[in-house]
Image (cartoon, rainbow, N blue to C red):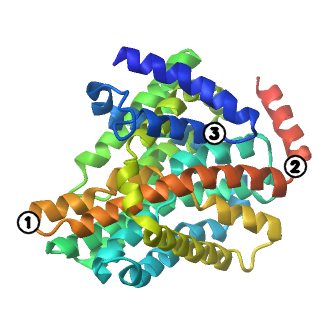
Amino acid sequence: MAVNLAELILIGLLVDWVFRKFRLPGLIGMLLLGVVAGPCVFNLLAPDFLATSQDLRLIALIVILLRAGFELSREALKKAGWKTLFLAFIPGIFEGTAITLLGPRFLPLTTLESALLGFILAAVSPAVVVPLMIRFIEERRGAKKAIPTMVLAAASLDDVFAITIFSVLLGLYTGHSVQLGGALAGIPVSILLGIGIGALTGWLLLKLFERFNPRATKRTLIVLGVSILLVRLQYLLENTVPFAALLAVMALGFVILEKREHMAHELSSKLGKIWVFASILLFALVGAQVNVEVALNAGLAGLALIVCGLIARSLGVLCCLARSSLNRGERIFVVVSYWPKATVQAAIGAVPLGAMLRMGRDPAAGNIILAVAVLSILLTAPLGAAVTAWAGRRFLSVDESEHSARDAAQESNA
């Protein structure tokens, strides 16, 4: 395992450097590195290393979501306004519904099986989107209208919605008793409880830091450890109370930023250094989950269905922005930033297949769902990341005034 980790770090850093030289996001190279090194291509990763993959990916995702929380200022969220809430639900509904309706026409799936696939694909990938948005926030691109902040917050809520709908549909498919109204009502409960617990945790950590004044490195480790426990709490409460732990992690960072801006930037800087290591693990191990053979089995029909879903999602984004002040280029940026898929699809793409096998049903539909989910990662993660990075540089203007104001504020706090 240690040798695999060392190899992954060294090759990952090299691949990241090469891709950046060609003005492409380094995460694309790390995703492809994981695919090539994974069990479905050259099988270079040891089984014990792959066995810890889920936990390592989760820790890396927590690191980047903490950084996201430390960048979510109140002023930026006010600028984003109602568009954030609309973007959290409407594009996913458009995409999930389109795949539900078109699935039986493209693939040998029933309407309900197509709906399962639709809401697997309806989740945007925070692993791909959040690092890109944080980079744009740091560069002050689109800061005047808080565009990266809007996408960052909406993408996190989007996952909660898509996974909840998928869980309801899976319950219907397996014949379990599911109260649709109760499940849908659980979405705002999950969001509000996640934000509330995260905010309370952030406030308690602030009091702890003010009382004992640990060094910045120890503060960072405490925040990271507590965030991992928040995710653990979600699993403990899974069957009793809906709780969005990843939103709680972001809310924790948001509260610290609001109360102690200098401390938040200090913690974000420390996490930025951890992210150099964590990003290699996250993207390479997500890539290692991809089964290329399964993806190819989806064929042109699966590819066409994914493209139709992306078109529907794009129309949903444009509907959300119809009355906004964003210009054409900025709207294009938001549209393409909602394309990447990876984390959720890798996590739940095989769940319907497992359910069918447990029920003794023909697993053909489950294999198709898994194949299309995997194909969506191969298609949209690298393409979406590359196009989003290009669109950000092309369409988002740098707000120099806010950049100067922020620098002055940090100097005065220091």
Is residue 411 in view from this perspective? yes
Q: Amino acid at mark 2?
A: Asp
- Compared with 201, 272 (above or below) is above
In the rendered view, tell whether residue 275 sits above or below residue 24.
Answer: above
Closer to the chain start, of discs 1 and 2, is 1
Query: Depth-wise, is mark 3 or mark 1 nearer the camera?
Result: 1
Q: Which residue is mark 2?
A: 399
Q: Quadrant of residue 119?
A: bottom left
Q: Residue furthest left?
A: 360
> What residue would you read off at disc 1?
360
Q: Nearer the viewer, mark 2 or mark 3?
A: 2
Left or right: 7 in relation to 115: right
Q: On screen, 245 above or below 39?
A: below
Reading the image, the residue beneath label 3 is 257
Q: Which residue: 31% across, 82% down?
A: 111
Residue 131, x across and y down, in percent? 61, 42
